[in-house]
Image (spheres, coloured by chain):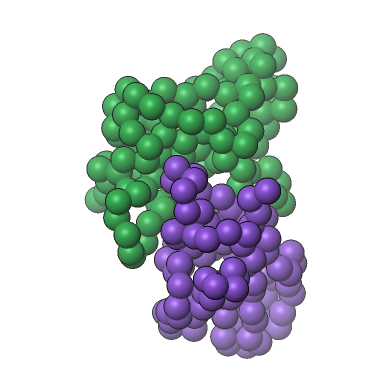
Chain colours: A green, B purple
Amino acid sequence: DGGITQSPKYLFRKEGQNVTLSCEQNLNHDAMYWYRQDPGQGLRLIYYSQIVNDFQKGDIAEGYSVSREKKESFPLTVTSAQKNPTAFYLCASTNPRDRGGEKLFFGSGTQLSVL
Amino acid sequence: GIQVEQSPPDLILQEGANSTLRCNFSDSVNNLQWFHQNPWGQLINLFYIPSGTKQNGRLSATTVATERYSLLYISSSQTTDSGVYFCAVEYVNRDDKIIFGKGTRLHILP
């Protein structure tokens, strides 16, 4: 089955530690996105990538980094510079050239908490 | 600035009632989608609707692009409809950046 896989489902970070959230898709989508969701809030865009080896900052990129070395993979690193990392992180993908039908697909999310 | 505004922020209804959720956007759009987030956090596509009207069972959606709003209708609400409904927009000439509203939290009482 095609889809988006995020791992781990739960992640704990110690003070000063960098952690990496995994996002893999087998939908052959060009574009991938990372969103952050805080309790009772909407989704805010962290980073997005339209094509391999290219990515752009979203609205809240500070304290995060990404890479896009393969089409299928878009890992997100939460660095020690992110002072308030506790949140639910959602990865999504789409094919911008695919007009019509369902467009944006989401993984099941990673809950990150600070120890 | 670029905005996606949803209303109402919260809605509590009795089972069987009908509801209308609204999404206002501030510029021309390539794409507009409605999502339902279930209690486990999973986001489920409801409609891809940059313009026009679509229906899927008890749910329907209408987007009036010229007036920059979209409506999601839920008829004969069930408790399983509870959750958060998000509107997401891709604006024209914004490099495929997709922006979400803050959502409408719907609670259906049995």
Which residue is pictured at 37% across the width and 41% down the height?
A: A31
Total labels drawn: 0
Horizontal and vertical percent position of residue A109: 51, 42
Horizontal and vertical percent position of residue A94: 36, 48
Whether B65 is drawn above or below A57: the answer is: below
Please tell me which residue lies in front, B70 or A102: B70
Which residue is pictured at 30% across the width and 34% down the height?
A: A72
Which residue is pictured at 66% across the width and 28% down the height?
A: A85
| Residue A107 visible in the current orientation | no
Q: Which quarter of the figure has residue A67?
A: top left
Horizontal and vertical percent position of residue A114: 68, 25
Q: Residue furthest top?
A: A16
Q: Which quarter of the figure has residue A32?
A: top left
| Residue A54 visible in the current orientation | yes
Going by the image, does B34 lie left or right of A98?
right
Please tell me which residue lies in front, A109 or B72: B72
Which residue is pictured at 67% across the width and 69% down the height?
A: B106
Horizontal and vertical percent position of residue B70: 57, 72
Whether B47 is drawn above or below B77: the answer is: above
Question: Which quarter of the image is occupied by the C terminus of chain B?
Answer: bottom right
Please tell me which residue lies in front, A92 or B5: B5
